[in-house]
Amino acid sequence: MRQITQREDTTAVSSDVLITCLLEIQTPEVIRLVADNENWQWGGHTWQAFPFEFTGINATGKGEIPRTTIKVSNITGTIKAALDSLQDLSVPVKLRVARKNISEADITLDFQLSGAAYDEQWVSLDLSPKVSYTRTFPNHAYGKVCPWRFKDWRCRYSGSAASCDKSEAACIALGNIARFGGFINEN
């Protein structure tokens, strides 16, 4: 079996592209936050610059539903007030990894708010994945087809071709095999 190794020069994110996390909480008045020191115009909406921390997804491998916590600044009291006004805390929450001036997110994770706690500095949002029997979690399947969007930051193809069928052969033909995201099985 042929092995493709990951090289730092082909996977490093260019320093001239600003990448950050966007947090969207579906309260009656949708809260859109960006982890930056200035507001963003992205996806047709204004995202408020707001400090928040994402701790990562906790998966034990023991059949439990993976959970995560996002800590959002409570200095202004805005987030706490919005949560206090809810009848039911189980509202949808989206976490996106996006690039400034690119209209589509590179990664989108859908969660549901399952609890919240706060102190003077932080509101801690406990999140669990939306329960769906038609969608896998995590949302990446192992297959021979490349899952990356053509020319996105993971594909990074910059040639003149207008499309790709996401196969290994197409990636070879385009000279982009080092960034092929599928799993090759020669059996």
Image (cartoon, rainbow, N blue to C red):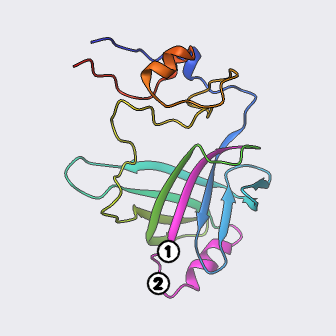
Q: Is 46 colored magenta in this rendering? A: no
Disc 1 marks a residue whose amino acid type is Val
Task: Tell me the SS state at disc 1.
Answer: loop
Q: Which residues are magenta?
A: 75-99
**Along the viewing direction, whichever of 91 and 83 lies nearer the viewer:** 91
Q: Do callouts 2 and 1 mark residues in contact (Cβ within 8 Å)?
A: yes
Left or right, 140 with reference to 92: left
* Residue 51 sits above or below residue 11 on the image: below
**Along the viewing direction, whichever of 112 and 151 lies nearer the viewer:** 151
| Residue for point 47% across, 84% down | 88
Residue 91 numbered mark, or none: 1
- Total numbered labels placed on residues in the image: 2
| Residue for point 23% across, 46% down | 61
Residue 166 in the image: state x and y as whole percent.
48, 30
Examine the image and state in which quarter residue 114 appears. bottom left
Residue assigned mark 2:
88
* Residue 38 sits above or below residue 171 on the image: below
Q: Quadrant of the C terminus?
A: top left
| Residue for point 56% across, 13% down | 175
